[in-house]
Image: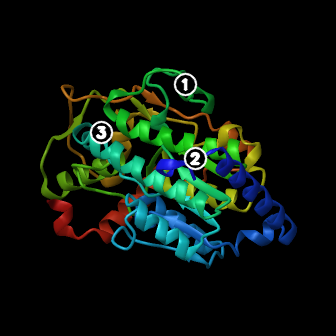
Amino acid sequence: MAAGGRLDYHDTRARRATWQRRDRQESMATTPDQQGRRSRIFLAGHTGLVGGAILRALQDHGYEDLVLRTIDEVDLTDQARTRTFFAEEQPQVVILAAARVGGIMANWEQPYEFIQENLGIELNVIHEAFRAGVRRLIFLGSSCIYPREAPQPLKEEYLLTGPLEETNRPYAIAKIAGIELCRSLNREYGTSYLSLMPTNMYGPGDNFDLETSHLVPALIRKFHEAKMTATAPVTLWGTGRPRRELLHVDDLAAAISMLLEGEGWSDIPDGLVNIGTGTDATIAELAETVRKVVGYGGPIVWDTGKPDGTPQKLLDVSRARALGWEPRIGLEEGLKRTYDWYCGTVPEGERRT
């Protein structure tokens, strides 16, 4: 170790040799299938929308050795606590679904918190996983990493080819940093750290707080409250013209389960895979679909003084399909499941406030 705690050349060379030795030992000891469902998996962020769906999918697929921690138990922005956690638990696989997330309003009003907290989580978890000898890691990013004016549909190779959307640039930069951490470790040390870029997610367990929620839960809550209180109109941000792609969270969880049981991660260019449906609609069209599902019959008013966000975010999912994954849950079916969960889970008083 060099002065000031930095790694010198010899430390780096020794670390590479250690990883190569571990790789040989693991390949001789077990087959990939044997390593799979017996692996000790740390799922970071299991209480959130995405993490909760991944947890259900892992349990349904027979994974039993799951390590789960709430933020009160392990604050992943704290490097010392994260390092202690990895030293004690010694997971073999990490799924990084923990993040500070929010809709356009939250991103616009709290840009520092979005970049600071997400950078902290990513650096601590990815680096400490590497230090602890974790060979397989799945990092969950976002489709907002792609340039605002990139050609549609968005291919993985469009990353870093133009300016980002201003309304969520801090969050996007944090996610890009996580991709580069994984990519750099793969290139230098031969790890298998995969970065998945999901499109806009929705489903049971979503956040319905109007100050911080994403598109679908905000629409569901606004239309539901208007229906229950017989108030109109419902006011929505922007023009309604931007196009959005939506994916039910259980489809993303299914993709992760499939990838955990497969091989060939090292063959994926830059370890980067888009996860989406490959189809989109305008926000106005999506609002009409949600209104139909909820049963609100009143008018909609568009507040054109508010920002629209990115004009279009449609993912090219040919790489994911080549790996054998396809989404299964249609939009209207997924919205009905989500609305049913909302009505059956969120207390009525909270739904009307």
Residue 190, position as x, y percentages in the image:
73, 49
**Residue 88 falls left or right of residue 293:** right
Residue 87, position as x, y percentages in the image:
54, 71
The label shown at residue 152 is 1
Q: Is residue 113 above or below residue 269?
A: below
Residue 115, position as x, y percentages in the image:
35, 42
Q: Residues within 10 Å of mark 2 (few under 14, many from 20)?
A: many
Amino acid identity at mark 3: Ile
Residue 19, position as x, y percentages in the image:
73, 57
Instruction: Tell me the SS state at disc 1.
Output: loop
- Sequence-wise, the earlier of marks 2 and 1 is 1
Q: Which residue is mark 3?
A: 104
**Residue 255 falls left or right of residue 247:** right
- Sequence-wise, the earlier of marks 3 and 1 is 3
Q: Quadrant of residue 64?
A: bottom right
Residue placed at 58% from the left, 47% from the top? 196
- Sequence-wise, the earlier of marks 3 and 2 is 3
Amino acid identity at mark 1: Gln
Distance (Cα) linking label 3 and label 2: 21 Å
Instruction: Tell me the SS state at disc 3.
Output: helix
Q: Total number of numbered labels?
A: 3
Q: Quadrant of residue 40?
A: bottom right
**Residue 17 falls left or right of residue 247:** right
Q: Residues within 10 Å of mark 3 (few under 14, many from 20)?
A: some
Depth order, front residue of 332/136: 136
Q: Which residue is mark 2?
A: 196
| Residue 316 visible here | yes
Amino acid identity at mark 2: Leu
